[in-house]
Image (cartoon, rainbow, N blue to C red):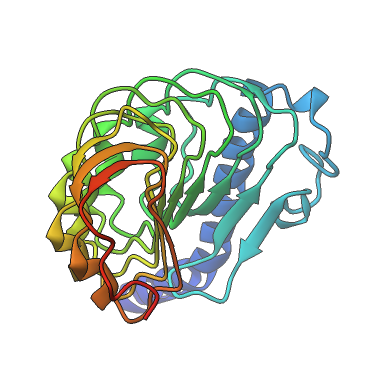
């Protein structure tokens, strides 16, 4: 066989086999990542765990959904809310095709959000950790999640001031972290023009005035900033937001008249 033909023949075999090889690698990586999550959070005591660590494809494990219809996929969505997860999230969990992670309602989850885990999930679009017992601060690389569209952290006791780096998450549509952080609301948040829901509430440690720049949130439908310690005037720019459907500003220390445009 001539050398040139032999070379083409070998390359042809590799080209044909690469997709199958890539899929096999992908499945192994997904299994390893989910296994680490299961072991680190007491999976044997979960309320719902059908097919976990079985020979079934990961997309058939309870709470795991495989999303193959998106360009660049497949991606995976994990929903394990109110499922008796305990302990800390695995810092060595590598899951580059993780799309959604919803683990709220598990009060036994403690510690900080691992930096390595966030760094290994660059395509994450939704992170819901509400009603968990996480502490500390958000890792710096959290603010590099350029695809993140929703962050829900209701009743999570994050410490420190509200990071100005939230302004880096330009794809955010939902931002909810009531009872977390302290201090003033950074103006960078009002540059997130894709926001549809913004909830920073039920926290007497949130102080300062509400910036006129809130009027830049032209897609906002829901605004909840009640039960804080905000002061000053209610900015009239809020009521120029034509998509706004619900406003909660009660139980603060605002001064002056309520803008006559409210409710229009």
Residue positioned 34% across, 71% down in the render:
262
88 horizontally vs 65: left or right: left
The quadrant where residue 91 appears: top left
Image x and y of residue 80, in percent: 69, 42
Q: Position of residue 225 (x, y in %)?
A: 37, 48
Compared with 190, 128 (above or below) is above
Q: Residue at x 28, y 28 (%)?
A: 182
Quadrant position of residue 115? top left
User: Which of the two residues, 17 or 205, is positioned nearer the viewer here?
Assistant: 205
Question: x%, y% of residue 36?
Answer: 60, 29
Which one is in front, 156 or 76? 156
Give the number of marks: 0
Q: Is residue 13 left or right of residue 199?
A: right
Quadrant in which the N terminus is drawn:
bottom left
Compare residues 94 and 261 and report the one nearer the observer: 261
Residue for point 21% across, 41% down: 231
Q: Residue furthest front?
A: 257
Where 25 falls versus 18 (above or below)?
above
Q: Name which residue lies at 15% across and 52% down.
A: 188
Q: Measured along the vertical axis of the image, is residue 253 above or below residue 170?
A: above
Q: Left of 186 or right of it: where is 52?
A: right
Q: Residue 48 appears at what percent x and percent y? A: 83, 39
Q: Quadrant of the C terminus?
A: bottom left
């Amino acid at each position: 066989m001539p050398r040139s033909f032999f070379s083409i023949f070998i390359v042809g075999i590799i080209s044909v086999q690469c997709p199958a090889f890539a899929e096999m690698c992908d499945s192994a990586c997904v299994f390893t990542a989910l296994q680490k999550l299961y072991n680190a959070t007491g999976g044997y005591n979960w309320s719902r765990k059908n097919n976990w660590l079985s020979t079934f494809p990961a997309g058939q494990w309870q709470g795991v959904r495989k999303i193959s219809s998106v360009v660049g996929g497949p991606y995976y969505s994990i929903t394990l809310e109110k499922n008796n997860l305990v302990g800390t999230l695995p810092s060595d969990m590598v899951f580059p095709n993780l799309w959604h992670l919803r683990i709220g309602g598990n009060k036994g989850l403690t510690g900080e959000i691992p930096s390595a885990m966030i760094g290994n999930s660059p395509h994450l679009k939704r992170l819901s950790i509400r009603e968990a017992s996480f502490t500390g601060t958000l890792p710096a690389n959290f603010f590099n999640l350029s695809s993140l569209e929703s962050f829900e952290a209701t009743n999570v006791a994050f410490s420190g001031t509200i990071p100005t780096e939230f302004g880096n998450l330009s794809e955010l549509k939902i931002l909810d972290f009531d009872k977390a952080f302290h201090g003033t609301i950074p103006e960078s948040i009002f540059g997130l023009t894709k926001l549809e829901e913004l909830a920073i509430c039920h926290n007497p440690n949130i102080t300062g005035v509400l910036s006129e720049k809130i009027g830049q949130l032209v897609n906002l439908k829901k605004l909840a900033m009640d039960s804080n310690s905000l002061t000053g005037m209610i900015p009239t720019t809020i009521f120029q937001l034509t998509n706004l459907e619900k406003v909660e500003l009660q139980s603060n220390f605002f001064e002056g008249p309520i803008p006559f445009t409210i409710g229009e």
